[in-house]
Image (cartoon, coloured by chain):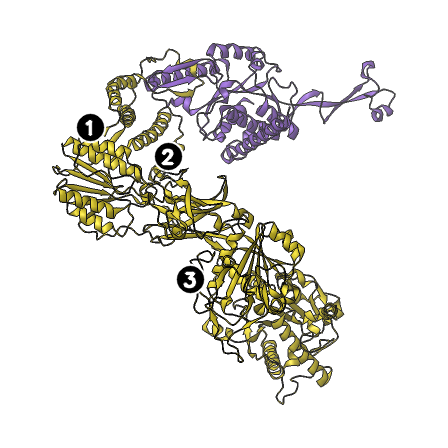
Chain colours: A purple, B yellow
Amino acid sequence: MSQGANRQDEARVVALRHAGEDAAASLPALLAEADRIAATVAQGVHGRRRSGIGETFWQYRHHRPEDGRQAIDWRQSARSDQLFVRQNEWEAASTVWLWRDGSASMRYASSRNHGAKIDRAAVCQIAVAALLTQGGERVSVLGESAIARTGALGLERASRRLALGPGDASAVEAPNISRFGRVVLASDFLDPIETWASRLSRFAAMEAHGVLLRVVDPAEEDFPYAGRTRFEHPGGGESLLFGRAEEARSAYRKRWAEHGERLADLARQYGWTLVTHRTDRPATSAVLALFRALARDV
Amino acid sequence: MFALGPLSFGAPLALAGLLTLPLLWLLLRATPPAPKRAIFPPLRLLLGAPDDAETPQHAPWWLILFRLLIAALVIIALARPVWTPPSVEEETRPALIVMDSGWASAAAWNDMRQEAERLINEAEREGRPVTLITTAPTGQAMPALRPGNADSARRQLETAEPQPWPADRGATAERLNAARAEGALSAPMAVTWLSDGVDSRDAAELSRALDALGDLTVIEPDAGRAPLGLAAPEPAADGLTVSVLRAGGDFPRTVAVTALGSDGRAIARTDLQFAAGEGVASADISLPLDLRNRIASLRLNGSSSAASIRLLGDQWQRPRVGLITLESDEGQPLLSDLHYVRSALGPHAQLIDGDLDALLAEDVSVLVMTDSARSDDQRIVDFVNEGGVLIRFAGPRLAAQGDDLLPVILREGGRLFGGSLNWDEPQRIASFPDTSPFAGLPADNSATIDRQVLAQPGSATPDRVWARLEDGTPLVTAERRARGWIVLFHVTASPDWSDLPLSGLFPRMLQRLMGLSQGGNAAVPGNGAWVLDQALDARGQLVSAPVSARPVPAAAFDTTIVSPVAPPGLYRLGSAASALNVIGTDTRMEPLPRDLPGARFASLDGPRAQHFDAWLLAAALVMLALDVLIALGLAGRLPARFGAATAAALLALGLLPLAAAPPVQAQDTTPERVELSDEMLQAALTLRFGYVTTGDNAIDTRSEDGLTGLSQEIFRRSAMEPEPPLAVNVNTDELIFFPMLYWPVTRDAGPLSPEASRRVANYLAAGGLIVFDTQDADIAMLRAGAPHPGLVNVLDSIDVPALSQIPTDHVLTRAFYLLQEFPGRFTGSPVWVEANPDGASRDGTSGVIIGSHDWATAWARGAGGGAAAPIEGGARQRELAIRFGVNIAMYALTGNYKADQVHVPDILERLGQ
């Protein structure tokens, strides 16, 4: 990758991450209300009452031949004739899987006054990731990495992937997540409802669910066009010519509302929460809604 | 031509294009504006939305109208519309058209002919007879005048041409009067005089004759085509001065003159500016002699008339004249013989001084040999034999003994008139014989001859004598030797022997002699006739001689005025060439007087026919540009902000020609004005010193006392008379009036304000001198090894260059007194000046003197006339301090004047050689 592109990417990551952390930081109202959320979400580390990877002592048990020499706790073993192995309690943080749609339609912004949908989605996701890692939870970007991380490094990686990653639809077609995972999917959900139904059914098979963050450009909802207009798909290819675009407005709005309702039905059906966010509104509102949904979820 | 009242069309068929406008209307209506583009992600939701995408949206009606207007404008412009103001009244009288056809008409001839054509056409339309007369003689007999029809007038007009000589309005007037007397022409007629706008003696005569035939309208050419004439160039010391004449003209005008060689190549070019209301413009052309000798003609660029070419005869070429110089002549230039020759020939010849070798190497064509430089060197003989001209002047030595290089045999001893011991009156010069090259020069009665050398009676044959005294003795004799000439003035070139060198005749005689040098064998133009070799036509082109030309007698050549028998051009007499030009030496060009009898003036440049197709096309172009913007705006390609800006820009663009350009502010290079109090202005009128106030009352008082004491001492001891000193605040006062500033620097002095430091820098740059005095005998330096904090602050604000202690040979050590130490109240500390002031603009003087000796206290005068305060070294040191003060003051006023003494040994040594 060339130096220039690299630098641009860096700048983009930094900008989005700043925006995300800003959105996360400016939530005083939420914090007051979300003590409970903080207690659950931010505490992060939950004892599993069984041995595993952790820092707290759980038990000594006898050494078994498959344990290897390194596993022997020599101090305990020296007190008797037995060889002991020290085991810690398994302490696992819950993992939240994030996915930000990277399709061409997400790169659309109707006005210079607000950013593209993809950026807003990334900002909201980064804000969520920041608060999750603050609380010790692990975050992972769906389709980019199987390893969930926490802490500053985890946030750093997640931010980078959310900002720059391709956001392939394949990641949601065949989700590579653990069972009972919690998922935040950010997209414009303009694909047919049937497509999303099949995708969510796969998550349901993993018994995973979470939040659908639907990012909407104001022009998509308001349809402010009039006069002779040629509409083009952002990916190129198709286009539609309207002699009088204003005549199509009411029909379009009706279809748009219908689309939204079906999406909400779908989410309800699979137990997901649908958060709709317009890019001309501040990102904090979306972050607030996401937190409410996640906190309930967690 | 198709006409709608005063509006006519040059290409009326193009108007048929207007028929296409309805078609265009339909077409424009049918063509919808380009659709807006919009990226729209939920395109899928739009699929099948109810809209008839193919129904075209009509362009707005105003846009269609706008475009139709553009098309109509273009079509009308292509039809070449012309607006002709309608004629006022119906004319019934026969038309009489008088056209000036002299050289001055050449520039405006086309306009004049068009106007004549128009008049003829008008007369033809109304069935009136037309008479056309041209005023300039053509060299052929003029037919009798009688009214003809338009066809004959038109034929006459076609053959009429401007002539290269002046119009003869007097003769025309006579013809008109004769025709009126015969009844061929009779009043009333509609008389139009298409004049060239130049006055002549007989203009009134013609005007009177025309007025007698009916109402006279005089039409003058427009100012841009007013005739111009190249006057005779004047020789200048380093080239020539060209002049151009014009007839009046109230506005400035610039013309260019090119000097051409005989092969037509341009040699030099200059611009001449006519000031408003001026009739003459002159400019100098600087040229080396070699180039100037090649000039054959001058051409007025952009003008084609006989007067726009000035041919130069060969007399114009400046010969190289060698003055044989002896070194002993250099002492007393005004008594030198050559001084008078030099003054006489300076404007007309290239003078070269030197000894014979140098002159022959310079390839001179004339040698001037005074008595003191006489020599019969073989090289001079050869020089003469090869075509050179030797001009000799008599003198005591020649009187004592003659030599070979003489046109006549001289009697020894010479002749003296009017002395105290003889009775002869000083003689005057007789008029010149016709065979002499001086023929035609007026004999100057005031010039008298006191002494001369005399020719042996037999040798002075009449053909050898070119000038005589009244008693018949030769004054100038000449002889042809092989291809050259020897000319002897029988008097000295200085006024010792005669008044001739002081008279105006002398330079003219010498100038005539220069003609001998041209080509070496040029005939002396005394008799014979000049024959036209090449003639100038009315357009200023060289053509072969017309048949009307006659030879011009040599005697009358100078006074000949160009005419059909003597057309302008290049004349030859033997091998000599001379030019006859349209503009003579006394030709004046004046505009036609407004009070010509019965004349009503009009101009050719009136609002005749206005073509405005260009304007229509320009308007259509601007509207097209607007249309593009409108189309872009309708298609949504024009951002709203940009749209507003564009509209504003367009509006501004449209208004631009209307809005007067704001006067350009000259860059403010004038130095800032400084407000000065009256007090300061008064104080600045006299010489006085200044001291910089510190804010410490005691120090300021001491400074004032010190400078007062010093001023008094300087007043007493030197020619300098300073007034009492003034206090100066560097933050508020202007410093520039003080030759020297005394600046006590306290330890707590802060840095200067930017304005103050700029002022101090200006003061130093302007040559001021500042004496910084820390008044502490460098105690700070001695005790702490640290620099004086106040001085550091002050000097940091000023750009002080590298310093050094006063060197022993510094001007300060001897500006008035010889000093090697510079004490004040204290002594022994170093005193600093600029190390290398040569680089500064102050002529090598230091701008600062920095020390710590508390000079002010030493200078101050106490109550009893002694020191005001104890001085370390007592009265002697105080005296030295005052002397140093005097030196500083002298240094401030005279700069490095005394530094020149440094070079005295060198100068003495050089003088000794």
Q: Which residue is mark 3?
A: B442
Q: Residues within 10 Å of mark 1 (few under 14, many from 20)?
A: some
Residue B277, percent from left and from top: 33, 53
Mark 1 falls within which chain?
Answer: B
| Picture quadrant where residue B851 is located | bottom right
Quarter that holds the N terminus of chain B? top left
Q: Is residue B258 visible?
A: no
Please identify the residue farthest to the front as the structure is shown.
Answer: B458
Determine if marks 3 and 1 fall on one subunit: yes
Judging from the image, what secondary structure is the residue with disc 2 in?
A: helix
Q: Which mark is residue B3?
A: 1
Q: Is residue B824 visible?
A: yes
Mark closer to the chain start, 3 or 1: 1
Q: Which residue is mark 2?
A: B644
Residue A213, percent from left and from top: 50, 22
Q: CA distance from mark 3 to mark 1?
A: 70 Å
Judging from the image, what secondary structure is the residue with disc 3 in?
A: loop
B825 horizontally vs B124: left or right: right
Q: Nearer the viewer, residue B325 or B441?
A: B441
Which of labels 3 and 1 is toward the front?
A: 3
Judging from the image, what secondary structure is the residue with disc 1 in?
A: strand
B354 horizontally vs B309: left or right: right
